[in-house]
Amino acid sequence: MKKSKKINILAIVLPVFILVVIGVIFANKNRVGNDVNSDKNVSAVTVNDNLIIPIKDISTTATFYPVEIDGTKLEVLAIKASDGTVRTAFNTCQICYSSGKGYYEQQGSMLICQNCGNRFNSDDVEITRGGCNPVPIFSEDKTVDSENITISKEFLEKSKNIFENWKTDF
C-alpha cells in the first residue's frame, strides 16, 4: 500500500475513532449513578431493613435513596425545601407509576415526571398528594430525630406495589 493511501485512511479512521471514544465517555458519564437516578444518588443506609437518611446530607438538590424490599427496587427522594424543611417522597408518580417511566429527575427547582413531563415544584414534595407528583412520605410514615429520618421496613413493604413496573421499558 502506498504511503499516501495509508495517510488518507488514517486521516479518516482516526477522527472517527476519536468521536466514538468521546461518545462512549459522555454516554457513560451520563449513566454514572443512574442505576436509580441521574441526579444525586447515594447508597442507602439500612439498619434492620429500615431506611436511614442522614439529615446533614440533604440539600436543595434531590437526593435519591435506593432500597430493595423482597426483590422489588424502590427509591426514596429527600430534598430541602426553600423554607429549610426536609421533605421526603417515593420517587414514583402517583398517576404514572405503572407506566415504568413514572419517576422524577430534577431540573433546577423542578422535578420532572419522565413519563408525562409534568413539572412539579420541589417545595411541594410531601405537601401535595394526588395527581402527577411524587408519592409523599408523611410524618406519620417516618421517624425524624435531630440526625436522621428513618423509614420503616414495614412501611416500605406496604408501598412496594407502586414500584412493580418501575423504570422498565415496555
Image (tube, grey):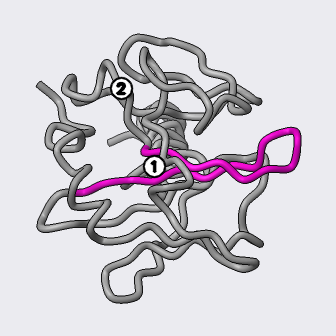
Q: Is residue 60 toward the left or the right of residue 100 in the image? A: right
Residue at left 72%, top 79%? 147
Quarter of the image with the C terminus in it? top left
Residue type pointed to by label 2:
Gln
Pick whichever, 159 or 141, lies toward us: 141
Magenta part, dominant SS? strand
Crowdedness near tag 1: few (<14), some (14–19) or many (≥20) residues, C-alpha within 10 Å: few
- Tell me: residue 100, above or below residue 118: below
Residue at left 72%, top 61%? 58
Residue at left 66%, top 29%? 124
Residue 74 position in % (x across, y down)? 31, 54
Disc 2 target residue: 94
Crowdedness near tag 2: few (<14), some (14–19) or many (≥20) residues, C-alpha within 10 Å: some
Residue 86 position in % (x across, y down)? 72, 53
Disc 1 target residue: 31
Magenta highlight on residue 129: no
Q: Tell me, for residue 72, which label it has, or none.
A: none
Quarter of the image with the N terminus in it? top left
What SS does tag 1 mark?
A: helix
Q: CA distance from mark 2 to mark 1?
A: 25 Å
Residue 68 position in % (x across, y down)? 26, 66
Q: Is residue 21 visible?
A: no
Q: Which residues are magenta?
A: 73-90
